[in-house]
Amino acid sequence: MATIDETHDAALRSWVASANGHADFPIQNLPLGVFSRAGEAARGGIAIGEMILDLAALAASGLLAGDALEAARAASGETLNPLLALGAGPRRALRRRVSALLTEGAAERAQVEPLLVARAEATLHLPARIADYTDFYVGIHHATNIGKLFRPDNPLLPNYKHVPIGYHGRASTVRASGAPVIRPNGQTKAPDAQAPAFGPIARLDYELELGVWMAQGNRLGQPIPIGEALDHVAGLSLLNDWSARDVQAWEYQPLGPFLAKNFLTTVSPWIVTMEALAPFRIPQPPRPEGDPQPLPYLWNEADQREGALSLDLEVGLSTAKMREEGLAARRLSQGPASNMYWTIAQMVTHHASNGCEMNPGDLLGTGTISGPEDGSQGSLMEITRAGREAVTLPTGETRTFLQDGDELMLSGRFVAAGAVSIGFGPCTGVVQAAPALA
Amino acid sequence: MATIDETHDAALRSWVASANGHADFPIQNLPLGVFSRAGEAARGGIAIGEMILDLAALAASGLLAGDALEAARAASGETLNPLLALGAGPRRALRRRVSALLTEGAAERAQVEPLLVARAEATLHLPARIADYTDFYVGIHHATNIGKLFRPDNPLLPNYKHVPIGYHGRASTVRASGAPVIRPNGQTKAPDAQAPAFGPIARLDYELELGVWMAQGNRLGQPIPIGEALDHVAGLSLLNDWSARDVQAWEYQPLGPFLAKNFLTTVSPWIVTMEALAPFRIPQPPRPEGDPQPLPYLWNEADQREGALSLDLEVGLSTAKMREEGLAARRLSQGPASNMYWTIAQMVTHHASNGCEMNPGDLLGTGTISGPEDGSQGSLMEITRAGREAVTLPTGETRTFLQDGDELMLSGRFVAAGAVSIGFGPCTGVVQAAPALA
């Protein structure tokens, strides 16, 4: 069961003033990331309000001992893979010690204060070297919405409610929030065209997903039982699975999406740890009457009791013109993360059920998380009915898909009674024009 | 154009006696790999006959200078990624110098001899840390054969002759030849079954492919023009894309194969370099009358003139009983690698055409290479018509798919008039029983 301890106390305040009341990074969060300052090597850090606690400096400070010290040392390099490999014990020890050090009235404040870096002065990097990236498809309303566009009478395929459907993505093109979204060139064929053509893609879309960061892995050939699956998960971030819908439609049969997806995937750069989100775990919504029971390898009572998340997700769009005119982003959707048909534990266990080797720093996407109703759909493909119904923006501009200059923003907020809300920080990207053809 | 130089001279002989007349590793080959001896760190090596030239030791020997020294130093660690990143120049300089050092009558023989390790005493590893693995589908007869099983009247999908179809695979489960093939457990559903079940998969198959090892990469957002594509390729190996056909049939819609493929991929551990295979490059077979011309980004005259390979591929099977009885492996298929509808350059250029970042050590599979006629098909799925027509073995045993204890062997042999033939060395695996269910 998820452990609630003193680090989650809603009354806890930090001597880092910007942390108190911070929408994403109050002292109850303490997410893990990798940052650098100009001219310095990248190293691990913990976000606290508008500051970052330098974990390499903390490891060298003499303020830590035991598991917490081991964890901080493992987080002192340019990726968090060594820390992720340690699993939950040292990660939690570090969290508890850092929480104490940052709490209002901490005796060590004078020693810790010099270890803080202003986030505004830091560049944030991917938190880990991603060895393998897999994208799932657990948003059942998204699968239904997309399926309806192709198969109105039979939107969900027969395997959907039995198999946590997933496929491999491209690890080399995952980037931290803020990376430019270079519109790809691609081969497309309009349904009524005689032949395909190659050039800048027209149907650039986003997908609202969660990213799951793997902690310690398994050995090749050894599955991960569902009861142990979350021991292999370090935490979560937001994930935008940018998509070229026109490429996807032409290329995806019979082996699945390829160049339609692998030009960029953006993640929020902070890992909100499993420890931090413990207060926000809720029961997995019961399956609708008549749906099949998952096979035993995917079923665990404890996972059903607290395998979902009390997490509100939101997407905003702002065009270049909107930013020029000082207008706020237009909200495209809002909805709960509980719209996932499969839990994170089920994703992990299914992935390793054939003995597939998982490694620390591996990234799993959940697939697009959409709600069943308008206003809660996690992609433009759904919102605009495949481009048939444009969205109107405050400037009078309209969008069916993303245009050059558009900025797309994902955000998420964990909410629970009696708990201080936490978030991921930004997951954004601005679309740039496609490279000129040779 | 592929460069022929003194290293390809058919008259060249080595003072390493086992190299002369060696089926795979005569002095004209000099493939790159990574090996270790008991208790020692892994490092790069070059195969010569039954020996391996230790590149870390060679780099320290004082026998090299300039580009060749840079290349050997880059090959001194436990992966060849740094060497692959250097591209063709240093790789070729190392080849020419090593060829001279190993040639019969070389003055340096006494200095080089201590740098040789018997292959029998070495463990071979993957030649590179594979950041991303992509599998293509360029074997048109395989695509047709498989398509016929599902769509007798329309076996090839409309995109096939326009798009080099590919999809992402799992990098973490690629292994060097000899790794055990642990039969996976998996979720399957027979067409007439009421519900799916989970357990040891029944339809274990292999796929005969080539592996393409990437040299220097490209930056995110920057495509690789087709005229430069092969500058980004270091060389080739054999690749076996082990497949669970029963899992594949149930899981692959709509996002493609996942657990059906990612439990293991086996490669022959030596990279036969682009330099070594220069004498074996042949014109890409012309497309059949009526087939579409590739789009301009995929078309290059030089690539068409020498983008295919004069390479014979073969698959052998031996059961545990056959090995007990001392029987030779049964040949399952034999055929030319020219049965590829798209060239390697077209695969690379298409992959990067949307700006997808490629990195040194990335692995591309060609997809199964089958011929059009019986006896040349690169998977049991094709040979047995999806399990309907069993293969009979010399022991009287029959096979539709692989059984525990079966050993599957891929081999390849480059052949050209006036050139000494070269090969890859073995690419094998023995099937083990599935892990017990929890």
Image (cartoon, coloured by chain):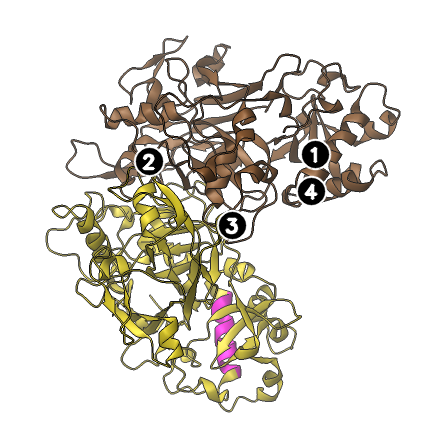
Chain colours: A yellow, B brown
Occupied quadrant, residue B74: top right
Occupied quadrant, residue B417: top right
CA distance separating discs 4 and 3: 30 Å
Q: Where does the magenta region start and end?
A: A90-101
Q: Residue furthest right?
A: B107
Helix, strand or loop status at disc 1:
strand
Which of discs 1 and 2 lies nearer the camera? The answer is 2
Which of discs 4 and 2 lies nearer the camera? The answer is 2
Find residue B121 and report its horizontal and vertical position in percent: 68, 28
Asked if both marks, 2 and 3, belong to the same chain, the answer given is: yes
Ranked by sequence position, the earlier of labels 4 and 3 is 4
Give the amino acid at mark 4. Ala
Q: Residue furthest bottom?
A: A105
* Residue under the point 41% across and 35% down: B164
Which of A221 and B315 lies nearest the eye of the viewer? B315
Main secondary structure along the magenta-highlighted residues: helix
In the picture, the disc for residue B159 is 2
* Dot 3: chain letter: B
Disc 1: which residue: B45
Find residue B42 and report its horizontal and vertical position in percent: 67, 40
Which of discs 1 and 3 lies nearer the camera? The answer is 3
Disc 4: which residue: B41
**Dividing the image into 4 quarters, which one contains the C terminus of chain B?**
top left
Q: Residues within 10 Å of mark 2 (few under 14, many from 20)?
A: some
